[in-house]
């Protein structure tokens, strides 16, 4: 019998959390769990094989990045619905079924996210679980640290959706976190899945943005998932994080925003990098090299990604 949902989990050297994530969905009726191991060296695949659980492990010889690995996992399934989970998620009892029930009873919804809470609590992850789609003003405010000096500024509050009501299921004009996304396979296939040109960061935002052209985005308040957060990125150095984030941010803007908005963001990123470079050069060579790379990317990005810019959504709001 064909399962009703393919649960896709991507992991890279996160053995303990991945085992917990898989164990938390094991009892879900009609599920097929697919774990894509992005070249782990910590025994993740072996630990999963020892579980008494319906799980298939696909081992990749290289770290493909998050979106490309999700695509690989999706291609290995055939269920009507797909649930994409981070490896540091724990599904509370009934959470997966509630997400599926919502999707089954709301055919005009193309994607749904659950309520992400801090581990061991009922505290929603405000500012992460649901966020507005990135805008040029919001990203520039973030670049210059506006929220540090004016915590209640309207630009940052709107982008992070800090006033969102997590106690009520609703349609959202924003993006449920990629840590927990449920969609129909037909819609996922129609938008050709994740853009594997993203390595990490903004691949989930890009996917939801493209899915949103086909229907509504939902938040399901009683589908509760505990989320640790940051387990993969704790293995990265700060310079690696800086370069990956800015490269992905620019790729996202090239795809979904006008040339003018992309140019404004490139200028802001270049300015921040240019200011930080001499300050870092005297005490942190690795970080200085990272911001030099960011400066180069910001200055050259449009020429390298002109095709994506030409397909941008010039109607995007500021």
Image (spheres, grey):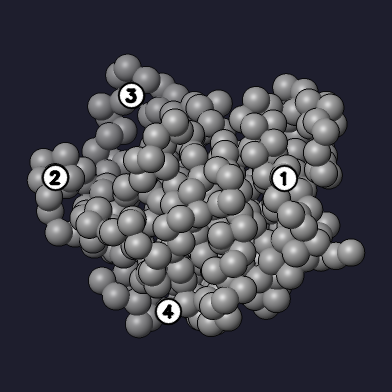
Q: Return the disc, 4 or 2, that comes first in the chain's sequence.
A: 2
For label 1, the residue is 27
Depth check: 93 or 186 in front? 93
Q: Return the disc, 4 or 1, that comes first in the chain's sequence.
A: 1
Q: Is residue 138 above or below residue 241?
A: below
Residue 131 at x, y = what percent? Answer: 36, 57
Q: Return the disc, 3 or 2, that comes first in the chain's sequence.
A: 2
For label 3, the residue is 281
Q: Quadrant of residue 56?
A: top right
Query: Could you tell me which secondary element the residue under label 2 belongs to?
Result: loop
Residue 232 in view (yes/no) = yes
Instruction: Tell me the distance, in whole angstroms, between the alpha carbons under discs 3 and 4.
Output: 38 Å
Q: Quadrant of residue 295?
A: top left
Give the quadrant of the N terminus.
Answer: bottom right
Give the quadrant of the C terminus.
Answer: bottom left
Q: Return the disc, 3 or 1, that comes first in the chain's sequence.
A: 1
Residue 11 in view (yes/no) = no
Residue 303 at x, y = what percent? Answer: 49, 65
Residue 116 at x, y = what percent? Answer: 44, 47
Depth check: 41 or 299 in front? 41
Q: Residues within 10 Å of mark 3 (few under 14, many from 20)?
A: some
Residue in the picture at 49% in, 40% down: 226
Q: Return the disc, 3 or 4, that comes first in the chain's sequence.
A: 3
For label 4, the residue is 313
Instruction: Tell me the distance, in whole angstroms, between the alpha carbons under discs 1 and 2.
Output: 43 Å
For label 2, the residue is 151
Instruction: Tell me the distance, in whole angstroms, between the alpha carbons under discs 4 and 2.
Output: 30 Å
Instruction: Tell me the distance, in whole angstroms, between the alpha carbons under discs 3 and 2.
Output: 30 Å
Q: Are marks 1 and 2 in contact (CB under 8 Å)?
A: no
Q: Nearer the viewer, mark 4 or mark 1?
A: 1
């Amino acid at each position: 019998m064909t399962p009703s949902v393919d649960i896709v989990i991507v992991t890279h050297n996160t053995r303990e959390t991945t085992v917990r994530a898989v164990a938390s969905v094991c009892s879900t009726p009609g599920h097929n769990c697919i774990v894509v191991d992005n070249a782990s060296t910590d025994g993740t695949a072996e630990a999963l094989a020892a579980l008494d659980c319906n799980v298939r492990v696909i081992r990749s010889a290289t770290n493909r990045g998050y979106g490309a690995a999700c695509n690989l996992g999706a291609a290995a399934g055939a269920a009507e619905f797909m649930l994409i989970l981070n490896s540091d998620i724990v599904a509370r009892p009934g959470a997966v079924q509630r997400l599926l029930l919502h999707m089954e009873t709301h055919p005009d919804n193309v994607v749904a996210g659950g309520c992400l809470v801090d581990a061991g609590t009922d505290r929603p992850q405000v500012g992460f679980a649901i966020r507005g789609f990135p805008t040029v003003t919001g990203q520039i405010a973030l670049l210059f640290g506006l929220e540090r000096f004016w915590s209640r500024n309207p630009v940052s509050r709107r982008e992070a959706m800090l006033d969102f009501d997590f106690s009520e299921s609703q349609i959202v004009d924003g993006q449920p976190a990629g840590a927990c996304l449920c969609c129909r396979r037909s819609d996922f296939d129609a938008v050709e899945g994740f853009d594997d040109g993203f390595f990490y960061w903004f691949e989930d935002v890009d996917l939801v943005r493209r899915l949103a052209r086909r229907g509504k985005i939902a938040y399901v308040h009683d589908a509760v998932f505990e989320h640790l957060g940051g387990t993969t990125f704790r293995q990265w150095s700060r310079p690696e994080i800086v370069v990956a984030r800015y490269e992905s941010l620019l790729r996202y803007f090239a795809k979904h925003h006008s040339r003018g908005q992309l140019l404004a963001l490139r200028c802001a990123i270049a300015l921040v990098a240019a200011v930080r470079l001499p300050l870092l050069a005297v005490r942190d060579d690795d970080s200085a090299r990272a911001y030099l790379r960011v400066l180069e990317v910001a200055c050259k990005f449009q020429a390298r990604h002109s095709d994506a810019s030409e397909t941008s959504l010039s109607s995007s709001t500021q």
